Amino acid sequence: MSIVNEFEDVVRTSYPLAPRTWLELGGAAEYFAEPRNADELVALVRRCHEEGVDTRLLGGGSNLLVCEDGVSGMVISLADASFGATSVDGPHLTAGGGAPLAHVINEAVRAGLAGLEPLVGIPGTVGGALHGNAGSRGGDVGQWAYRATVLTRAGEVVERKRDEMVFAYRQSSLDELAILDITFALEQEDAEALTKRMQKQWIVKKAGQPMSHQRTACLFKNPRGMSASMLIEQAGLADASVAGAQLSNRHSNFVVVSDDATSSDVLKLVDLIRSRVAERLGVELETLLEVW
């Protein structure tokens, strides 16, 4: 029995991925699945592993560019509510890997748990945030990680304790297929004071980023001790563009795409910026944008 037939309730073929990403660009997935619970997810991943079908996990799509040719293999989304549950037990907050990071931050603040509020305004799921150790000037999400349950590409469910997890700037050791849930050890604080602090951080952060209605994504990691946006501006590229892809006039490390843009436009813009910054300033920029 084929994977499509075996999981006919959750697997679709030639599924367009563009609507699932913030940039809304790119082709289709050969197979696309939205499991309804963890057991169904594990069974699907094990079957793909047995058949030699490559698997990828699609989170919130905020830092993802899909190429025009699309993606071979199985793309899996944890959009079902069963993957986004949250719970609080004292200073510990546990969230499903598919939970929106914004929702998890709000739940923590509401419960009077401090630590995650500097991450306000960062899009995507909490699983994606932890995988890439998302952060801001106020800290990174990994510093609060206490325990994680992950799913390997072979379909094995494994628990990772704090001393088994390594976090660095915009990266982590959690490189398995999926983070099923994560427990944070946070600091108890007054909920009202936390709410006010989070609101101030939100206002400041949004003032320096592209407008919420725009199709946008952040392009590069900040090199150690430097700002990618400042380097781009110093290289004379603040208003750089390629066809339908242009750098934001509010933050030069963000690309904004128009209705006639293509994935190739974005890739050409990335290449232009990387080569020009390396040539003029001697700094190699590393992409934050994930390309499929």
Image (spheres, rainbow, N blue to C red):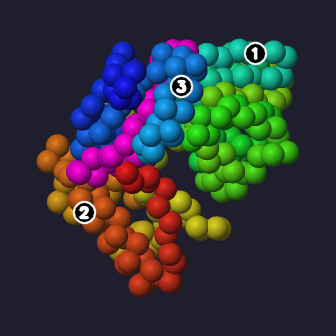
Whole-percent x, y for residue 211 in the image = 35, 39
Q: Residue at x 44, y 32 (%)?
A: 76
Disc nearest the viewer among 3 and 1: 3
Whichever of callouts 3 and 2 sits on the residue coming sooner in the sequence is: 3
Disc nearest the viewer among 2 and 1: 1
The N terminus: image quadrant: top left
Q: Residue at x 71, y 15 (%)?
A: 87
Whole-percent x, y for residue 267 in the image = 31, 61
Answer above or below: position of 172 versus 188: below
Q: How many residues crowd mark 1 within 10 Å: few (<14), some (14–19), many (20+)?
A: some
Q: Which residue is mark 1?
A: 88
User: What is the spatial separation of the Cα atoms under label 2 and label 1, in whole angstroms?
Assistant: 46 Å
Q: Is residue 177 left or right of residue 59?
A: right
Whichever of callouts 3 and 1 sits on the residue coming sooner in the sequence is: 3
Answer above or below: position of 147 versus 289: above
From the viewer's side, name the closer residue of 82 and 64: 82
Whole-percent x, y for residue 73 in the image = 37, 43
Whole-percent x, y for residue 93 in the image = 74, 22
Q: Which residue is mark 3?
A: 43
Q: Which residue is mark 2?
A: 241
Q: Is residue 129 visible?
A: no
Quadrant housing residue 97: top right
Report the number of numbered marks: 3
Q: Is residue 17 left or right of residue 81?
A: left
Magenta stretch, residue numbers: 63-84
Answer above or below: position of 161 versus 106: below
